[in-house]
Image: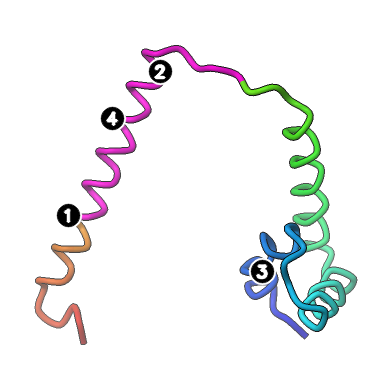
Amino acid sequence: MLTCREFLQELTDYLDSTVDVELRRKLEAHINECPNCFVILDTTQRTIKVYKGMQPQEIPEEVHVRLMKAVERKMAATKAGSKHSATKPGANA
């Protein structure tokens, strides 16, 4: 039996129908036994259906610029944090 964590790791491939037959069987067995993962699967499938039926919407240029700046700051902070933790004594232990 798969764990919930394993189910979640395979969810995208399951939804894309790219998992092999044996893994699909294990995932479906887990869904039938785990109400929480069933709800996650069902909600995700419903969300995909909603978004597939929508037309793409453009966002205002100002919002796009602010979003890109926020992403760049987050990426820079993440990169700086990983460099910082790699230089701490015992960080690679």
Placement of the N terminus among the 4 image quadrants: bottom right
Residue at x 70% of width, y 22% of height: 55
Q: Is residue 75 above or below residue 64?
A: below
Q: Secondary structure at mark 2?
A: helix
Specify few, some or many for label 1: CA neighbours under 10 Å numbering under 14, 14-19, or 20 or more: few
Sequence-first disc among 3 and 1: 3
Report the residue marked by disc 2. Answer: 63
Q: Is the C-beta separation of discs 3 and 2 under 8 Å?
A: no
Report the residue marked by disc 3. Answer: 10
Give amino acid for label 4.
Lys
Q: Secondary structure at mark 1?
A: helix
Specify few, some or many for label 2: CA neighbours under 10 Å numbering under 14, 14-19, or 20 or more: few
Residue 43: give x, y in percent of width and height: 78, 47
Residue at x 13% of width, y 63% of height: 84
Q: Nearer the viewer, residue 4 or 70?
A: 70
- Whole-number angstrom distance, CA of label 2 to CA of label 4: 10 Å
Residue 80: which disc?
1
Q: Is the C-beta separation of discs 2 and 1 under 8 Å?
A: no
Sequence-first disc among 3 and 4: 3
Residue 28: give x, y in percent of width and height: 85, 72
Residue 19: give x, y in percent of width and height: 73, 72
Residue 69: which disc?
4
Give amino acid for label 2.
Val
Quadrant of res 73: top left
Give amino acid for label 1.
Ala
Residue at x 28% of width, y 30% of height: 69
Magenta span includes 26 = no
Q: Secondary structure at mark 4?
A: helix
Magenta span includes 69 = yes
What is the magenta range?
57-79
